[in-house]
Image (spheres, helix red, strand yellow):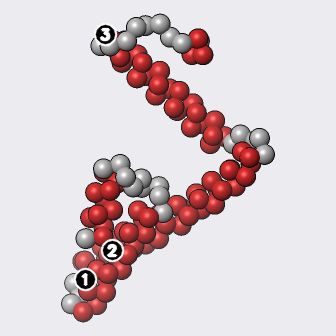
Amino acid sequence: MIVLLAYFANQYGRLPSEHWLFPFANLVGAVLILISLAIQPNTPSLLLEAAWALISIYGLAKSLSGLKKMTMAEEHSTAGVETREDTDQKSDALTSAIELKDFAVRRGLASAVRPSFLW
């Protein structure tokens, strides 16, 4: 049930897969199923849940290391230093805004005049 709730929250846009809670919920779910498999063994399910647990541990480690990098990036940004990730995120956001504007223009929902900062 834990894995299902995490997946639903992810699909609903409430829990991004990059957030540490997502792989943690998957790990807890896998461990609970592994415990139940110790009582009533089933080799294919045991292998599947062991792999699920290992992947979840990898995802959790990756997510937690991302938090550490984010904390370091925040320290740099407070010092006035912009990281490459900050620049990439701004670029992605600007690209998305331009694509949305172009879509709206093609559908006749907005004018083709672009703000001066986009030139």
Q: Secondary structure at mark 1?
A: helix
Left or right: 77 in relation to 114: right
Q: Is residue 84 visible?
A: yes
Q: Give me the C-alpha separation between circle 3 and circle 2.
A: 48 Å
Of callouts 3 and 1, the N-terminal one: 1
Q: Secondary structure at mark 3?
A: loop
Q: Secondary structure at mark 2?
A: helix
Left or right: 69 in relation to 22: right
78 up-or-down from 93: above or below: below
Question: Mark 3 highlights which residue?
Answer: 108
Q: Which quadrant of the rendered structure holds the N terminus?
A: bottom left
Seen from the viewer's position, the closer of residues 50 and 69 is 69
Residue 35 - label: none
Of callouts 3 and 2, the N-terminal one: 2
Question: Mark 1 highlights which residue?
Answer: 43
Residue drawn at x 22%, y 84% is 42
Q: Mark 2 against mark 1, which lies toward the viewer?
A: 2
Seen from the viewer's position, the closer of residues 75 and 53 is 75
Residue drawn at x 63%, y 40% is 86
- Residue 58 at x, y percent in the picture: 49, 67
- Residue 70 at x, y percent in the picture: 62, 53
Amino acid type, callout 1 = Thr
Question: Mark 2 highlights which residue?
Answer: 29
